[in-house]
Amino acid sequence: MTTLLRILKPDDFHVHFRTGKMMETVVPLTAAWCGRALVMPNTIPPILTGKQACAYSQSIKLAAVGYNFDPLMTIKIVPTTTPNVVAEAKSLGVIAGKAYPVGVTTNSDDGVHNFRAQNMQEVFSAMQDVGMVLCLHGETPHDFCLDREEKFLDTLRWLAENFPRLKIVLEHITTAAGIKSVTELPDTVAGTITVHHLLLTLDDVVGGNIQPHHFCKPLAKRPEDLVELVLTATGGNQKFFLGTDSAPHAVTKKECACGCAGVFTAPVALSLLASIFEKRQRLNYLELFTSRFGAEFYGLPVNSTIVMEKTVWQVPAMYGDVVPFLAGTTLSWKIVD
Amino acid sequence: MTTLLRILKPDDFHVHFRTGKMMETVVPLTAAWCGRALVMPNTIPPILTGKQACAYSQSIKLAAVGYNFDPLMTIKIVPTTTPNVVAEAKSLGVIAGKAYPVGVTTNSDDGVHNFRAQNMQEVFSAMQDVGMVLCLHGETPHDFCLDREEKFLDTLRWLAENFPRLKIVLEHITTAAGIKSVTELPDTVAGTITVHHLLLTLDDVVGGNIQPHHFCKPLAKRPEDLVELVLTATGGNQKFFLGTDSAPHAVTKKECACGCAGVFTAPVALSLLASIFEKRQRLNYLELFTSRFGAEFYGLPVNSTIVMEKTVWQVPAMYGDVVPFLAGTTLSWKIVD
């Protein structure tokens, strides 16, 4: 007997594809199970304009040849972004702008210093007018690492209040406080949850040995936060949907004296989600989280379907020079080609 | 002009010397600035008896040839330790027993499951009777990483109350709660503070990039805890003295997927302490913390003196195959040979 599960094909509303050879390695691993993915613009150099996003999109499509996969493009919202940049990007198909507070994570040194500055307000206003979603890395740059998400929530509330037609996504929520804020704010505000934040606490990063492959920004938090994230993701609340934040780094940039933030979940994300929802006896809610709520928030049609099989497989030690999340362990759901 | 500082030669009341080639590398780096050091027994295999401690002491003395240095020996208090083992160890010169709750740090899988078990109480009673100090790794094994020290304080209070003549040291305190407990308990209870815990918070481990050479057990905590630790160490309170917990690991055991806990501070500890006390305009309190309060608690005479010079030097990248704390950075006090 084989247990199969057919669901609407997921979208990953937060992924890092990088560029060059790394991109060629990782794009197929997302395209294998996603109909679409929202591609983060914090490459080197960054994606700051619609034209750059178009060129980047073309290179991703080349890397995804053979897959039925559409990259959803973003630009990076930086202090030099203008309303014109926003309007042009939207006209070229860019659906979201990603804002990083300065210095909060990988390649964010050109990020936003002050969300309430006049020029930033003009950019958010333009995004609101053209219907471009604002995606937020919701952490303050200068607070203690465990407080940064909660401290950012004032800015989230201020944005929601002052730009009431702007669609806003609080990305990769890690705290019960973040879940609460998004839940309480109007329906223009949604949140993404990663797969690794449904499995890890800070204990998995530094509670036993130190594990750089579990290290990301925002940091995984307390057990109480993990419980709240799992309840929310599996709870059928349309404000919360999947954004893996799958973030590949070469192993030499992780296993070193000063390692980069990012967990590479693309090859294991859907398999792990199936197990997480199954454990909660919520498999019937899986496609809401992975395939429906995000599409609805972004105003996109749902994808066709994908089939998973309940069968054990071992996560490879490496993909190219990247160590995947839970490398070498055995998972219990596998995507049927 | 040269600024010199002459102080009583320090004692390090918590150091890991390991064995073999590693021991030969690290012992001289402590012996260069310490008159004595309390040597932790969690080697492989562990030091469980007085005879083993004597043999270990001999090998340390060989590694310290040419230095005026005395190792102070400990045994590991484990579930199989008996009052006879304690009495024999004391007669052979062992001055302290170190108890690790099971699984809390490097080589502690044979640690104590239950401090209130009858057989453990008999061991603590024997230690009290023969005058052997009980050194505690004060963390609970199963709580969230940031809560473990505070959760252990009930056990500390219970020990102090039930063994009122037993000298107890809460090692490597990392929290304001730990400082408060030791302060409030009778004078039989003291605490050690490491150098790295006077400089780091969790932000230095995982707040920016992930930095395995800043990773130790107990974890560095919040900025408020750091402030309290610095105020206490520099504050002239005789209940608190230096125990570096200098803990070497080969670089391959730190910069990897699953790195060991431990910060190797032996080569830089005194230099950093001078700067910390100087910054607080408390240089005149330095030798109380490094050289007097610990000796008084353990009932030992003070050492002769050592001279430091205010001069810049660069911390080497490696000592053998061990990366020292703050490798490659420039420090401003140096021990005069």
Image (spheres, coloured by chain):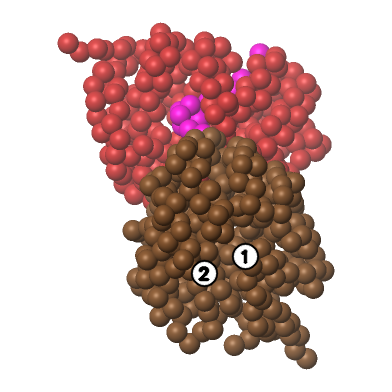
Chain colours: A brown, B red
Residue A241: x percent and y percent?
A: 67, 62
Report the residue marked by disc 2.
Answer: A72
Residue B119 horizontal side relative to residue A170, left or right:
right
At a point 76% along the width and 85% down the height, the residue shown is A3
- B142 and B7: which one is in front? B142
Residue B6 horizontal side relative to residue A334, left or right:
left
The quarter of the picture where the C terminus of chain A appears is: bottom right
Residue range in magenta is B187-204
Q: Label 1 is found on which chain of the structure?
A: A
Classify A140 as above or below B277. below
Whether tag 1 and tag 2 are in contact, CB under 8 A, the answer is yes
Q: Mark 2 Cα within 10 Å, few/some/many (few <14, many 20+)?
A: many
Classify B156 as above or below B115. above
B323 within the magenta span: no
Residue closest to the far top: B284
Q: Secondary structure at mark 1?
A: helix
At a point 77% along the width and 69% down the height, the residue shown is A285
Residue A280 horizontal side relative to residue B241, left or right:
right
Residue A89: x percent and y percent?
A: 44, 62
- A26 and B209: which one is in front? A26
Residue B68: x percent and y percent?
A: 34, 24
Separation of residues labelled 1 and 2 (CA atoms): 10 Å
Regarding residue A268, the answer to whether it shows in the image is yes
Q: How many marks?
A: 2
Residue at mark 1 shares a chain with residue at mark 2:
yes
At a point 63% along the width and 82% down the height, the residue shown is A335
The amino acid pointed to by label 1 is Tyr
Which label is found at residue A298?
Answer: 1
